[in-house]
Amino acid sequence: MNIGKPKLNVGGLQRRWLLNTASVVFALGLVCVMAVAASFAAYYYSNMESDLKKRARTTRDFFADYVDQNYNEFYQSCITYAQTFEDKDALELQFINIEGELVASSFGRWAGESPSTPEIQEAVQTRDSRTYVGKDPNTGERIMAVSCPMIYSNGEVIGVLRYVTSTRVVDLQIFLVALISALVLLVVMVAVILSSNYYLRSIMNPVAQITEKAKWIANGSYGVQIKTPYRDEIGELADTINEMSNKIAQNEKMQSEFISQLSHELRTPLTVINGWSETLLADENLDAETRQGLKIISGEAKRLTEMVMELLDFTRIQDGRMTLTVEPSDIRGSFEDTVYMYSSRLAQDGIQLNYEDNDEDIPEIPCDTKRLRQVFLNILDNAAKHGGEGKRIDASMHYEGDSVVVRIRDYGPGIPEDEIPLVKKKFYKGSSQARGSGIGLAVCDEIVSMHGGTLTLENAPGGGTLVTVSLPAGH
């Protein structure tokens, strides 16, 4: 029996891995990217601030030589120094008076509005250098500014020396560092996901094969073996399932052989019992009590014979020895004969069997009439045993599409919903207390399947059980 390549179902594992592992790796990587970007930002901004503060102190020390000048001469010196400032392409040097007005700038006397960043007044109040990083209120550009107080000879703060530079270049460098780090993280994540997918598939491929073979074993294909090249825990699991499959196959073979032998052994005494009971019943001199006892013996012997025949059919199915004698047959005639024959037996138990007669043209179909009659009788018998308390059974046959559909419904308690998927399994009787071996429906299902049809059971609306047999007309 060939088993196709099993379908992989790794979606659940992949989702769990992405949530539990890849997300953690990504989060840690993202933290690392942010830490690297923050470190570079702190480094660049610290160096920039240190450079501006050093320049500011140097310039302030230079102007300390002019503290003996009057205010006008002092500010004139500031203007002259600003005009001759050499690094005006990279920095702006500003001189601001105590009122916060721009006195001189390396960008020209009328370089713009007076600055209004908070570090200017902080420098005046604390008499120490202060730094500002943020947007220029006048231009909206991101800047770094260092304001250093200029103290006159009498100890009075007469103004502020301020260096200003744009952070655009530094911000671009920090962005590039963050982008490169993010790209590295992306490459790492792709490598991790690809390697993990490969690893997951290296596990899931043999697991999927094991699962597929285990399903075959669960469905009755005992003896099926799992082949795996792995010698790890997966290989041990496969070996354990193979051993289990072999042992189940051996037990099933022993069981089938025992049932087959026992059934054959029982047929001979049952035939004798049936023959002699009928012979004795033919005696007209029997008293009523003896005759009743012989009828009971004859009936039970026939029931036991039917069970033995079911067991024989079951062993033939298990061994693959059941065959069909297929020929074009009047399926409608066979079904109606079965219904009419069984209706008299049901009438003795007070059960009414209603056949829905119709004028549909139901064609002959290729089938084994004897086997299908066995199916119909078994279904009717089950309806009487499990739904007989409803005292009514409905039977019908219709030609629907390209199939002949037979429906048999009882009006009993129905089947518990959790037992419906199991009722066709061999030896399954569920919660039912009715007599029987539990293999009749399994045999019927196999016979119908061999005809290319389907047998389904369901609870009918309003109560009771509905059994539907669908047989293809041209199979």
Image: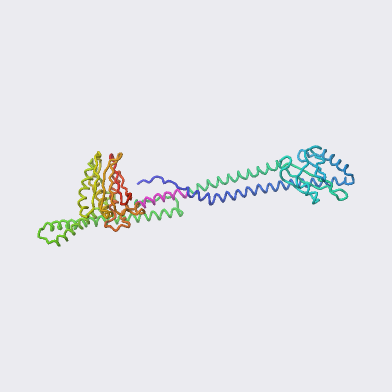
Q: Splitting the image into 4 quarters, where does residue 332 fall?
A: top left
Asked which colour scheme the image uses, the reply is: rainbow
Q: Main secondary structure of the magenta part?
A: helix
Tell which of 159 and 321 is nearer to you. Answer: 159
Q: Is residue 60 magenta?
A: no
Q: Quadrant of the C terminus?
A: top left
- Relative to 216, is 171 on the left or the right? right
Horizontally, residue 204 falls left or right of residue 164, namely: left
Going by the image, does 381 lie left or right of 188?
left
Is residue 211 located in the magenta-colored stretch of the structure? yes
Identity of the residue drawn at 53% across and 50% down: 19
x 50%, y 51%: residue: 16
**Is 76 or 264 nearer to us in this picture?**
76
x, y percentage for residue 30?
A: 60, 48
Count of marks overlaid on the render? 0
Which residue is rendered at x = 42% and y = 49% of the image? 209
What x and y, as percent, mark residue 388?
26, 54
Farthest residue toward the left? 285
Residue 328, image quadrant: top left
Relative to 168, 280 lies left or right: left
For the record, the magenta segment spans 202-219
Where is residue 18? Give x, y as percent.
Answer: 53, 49
